[in-house]
Amino acid sequence: MTPAQFDGLMPIVILMGIAVLLFAGGHFVSVLLAPKKPSILKQTPYECGEQPVGSAWSAFNVRFYVVGLIFIIFDVESVLMFPVATIFKELNEVGEGGYALIVFLSFISVLIEGIAYCWKKGDLDWVKSFQVSNKK
Amino acid sequence: MFAQLLFLLSAVLTVGCAIAVAVTKNIMHSCIFLLGSLIGIAGLYATLGADFVAVTQIMVYVGGIVILMLFAVMLTGGKDFVSRAQNLLGLAPSMGNKWTYGIGLFVGLVFLLTNIKLLSNIMKSYPAKTFGNEFPSTVSQIGHLLVKEHVLAFELSSVLLLGALVGAAIIARPRKQ
Amino acid sequence: MNQTLVSYLSQYEFYDVLIGIFGKNEGLLAFVIYLLFAAAIVGLCATIGGLGTYAERKISADIQQRIGPNRVGPYGILQFLADGVKMITKEDVMPNTADKFLFYLAPMLALIGVFATLAVLPWSSGFMMADLNVGIFYLIAISSLVGVSVFLGGYASNSKWSMLGGLRGASQIISYEIPVTISVLSITLLAGGMGFGTILSQQQGTPIHWFIFHNPFAFIAFFVYFIGALAETNRAPFDLPEAESELVSGYHTEYTGMRFGFFALAEYIEVFVVCGVGAALFLGGGNLPFNVQFDIIPLQLFQVVIFMTKALILYYVVIWIRWTFPRLRVDQLMSICWKYLTPIAIFNLVGNAVWIVVFNGKSIADLVFGGH
């Protein structure tokens, strides 16, 4: 890697370092200035003034997981499309636009097929997923 | 100078967080240490000059896989996610007895030695690469490879992803009672 | 090739003088330059974020025919400083059932994710800290740390409101990342590169050369991007993660004092960043409306002003939308993302690819007026 290219990574590290330092600094100042009078009532999780019932850490709906799964597939597809999109114009200028278009469109068509399948089967629905599963 | 610093930083982050993943007793904390480890690996890719792969690492793993893991952990619910079983020298939560540890250690050693044996030849035949001033973007190189030489792999990967999508949707779908 | 702030400054004579001062140690000089510039940018963005809270309250007051904050300083403009001081001096309360480690970590992750995006934000054609080859792709990737931090903030509090807000937030942020990414792909297709330098150099000249007016598909892509960006930054009408009328305050219900301040700061800076990216990708960024052959520092500063004007106009629209539209329901939120925005974004992508091949990469302006 050339020095110039490598320099491009330095601001990222510096900015991340600034974020950490700012957080630590803010905490330090807050510890110095802020009052510290903890009490049991202050430290209960807010539940509109009632005594909290049980822990908030419990099993939750599977929908969030389904959304995460579908997201990852699309994420990977878009990652694969980025390099091709980058050189698409370049290929078009050397007269290989038609070929590139076919490659690109056939890739996208499979993606569209995936989203159409999920749509048809009701995996994209938020509410109806239980009724849909009983459908044929 | 900065290259070495970046490498050290990434390597410490990767290895340190990887150890923390194994040692910590809380599964949510493990997930977050894994996040740190994956970011460290992205940094290692960046030091190798593979900018696109580094960003892909962040995009797919940090943005996707870790969140999915957090969702998956929450899916199991339960009162708390802290493991109380401590076997390995009282340090890490783990299962097994001295036989499983012994076999694990043996397999690990064999694996390590084989890798060293295999990789040492490769490393000798490829000297450290120095890039000139005209280092072309890896993105367009990857793009050309995907469109020209590996176009079949590119198209098949979309079919593979379609299969993964359908499989994920079917597995996660609520069952009929 | 990657261009950086240092390689840009090195074309001026004062750089040689600086090199002399630093005893030929270019690495150290680069570090100092980046550090100073990063501190300046963080300061600027913190001010913008602070003024954002003020602007939000003032504009909402205007829309609702109230006066809004008017006590601290002229027209109440120093209100954000008063808020900041108040946050520092407030007691730090943490629920005793909370996961302490993650409770501390969540705001820090949000700050890291947002600050890291500032490295590639194109203030002007020269004042870019790093014009990476993978610029916009990097920005999308690293800002997903905010999604993790939202989830962790909700989880670590061990409060039911926070948990619901965190879950909603994480699933919303990852869902809307898809239409945003595909819209950005359209621009990558048109510009032939992911670096902000490449993207901006294609949009020089009068507004008709901006990518938003490149072709009809790019025009739609801008709105898809903007709606997706609203949702990714948890802004109304997509503010379900912190819906104050149903979830108290969402994932930061249990956060007080400084840590709450950091969450708020990260959120307001992120809004500015997505507005800036929208301005750079679609609205020509800091490009001057005329061609300049020479390159001097004052012109660069002028570009910074143009870029900030465009970004702040978008910022105003974001605030305006918040006080105009009612909030969505969760199921509507998800169906808008997966059933409307994503298919439209894919359609735009296909449209852009076909347009490039059919019209040989020319924009509407090129076709009408000739040129290029």
Image (cartoon, coloured by chain):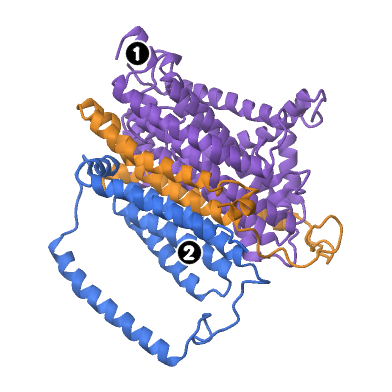
Where does the C terminus of chain C fall, quadrant-wise? Answer: top left
Q: Mark 1 falls within which chain?
A: C
Q: Is residue C21 visible?
A: no
Using residue C371 as the reference point, say whether residue B166 is left or right of it.
right
Chain letter for the purple part: C
- Residue under pointer 2: B34
- Residue under pointer 1: C366
Pointer 2 local density, CA inside 10 Å: few below 14, some 14–19, many at least 20: many
Q: Residue at x 84, y 55 (%)?
A: A48
Return the x and y of residue C13 as percentages of the image width and height: 32, 28
Chain letter for the orange part: A
Q: Residue furthest front?
A: A136
Q: Residue at x 28, y 34 (%)?
A: A102
Chain letter for the blue part: B
Above or below residue C250? Residue C305 is: above
Where does the N terminus of chain C fall, quadrant-wise? Answer: top left
- Nearer to us of marks 1 and 2 is 1
Using residue C46 as the reference point, say whether residue C211 is left or right of it.
left
The answer to which quarter of the image holds residue B120 is bottom left
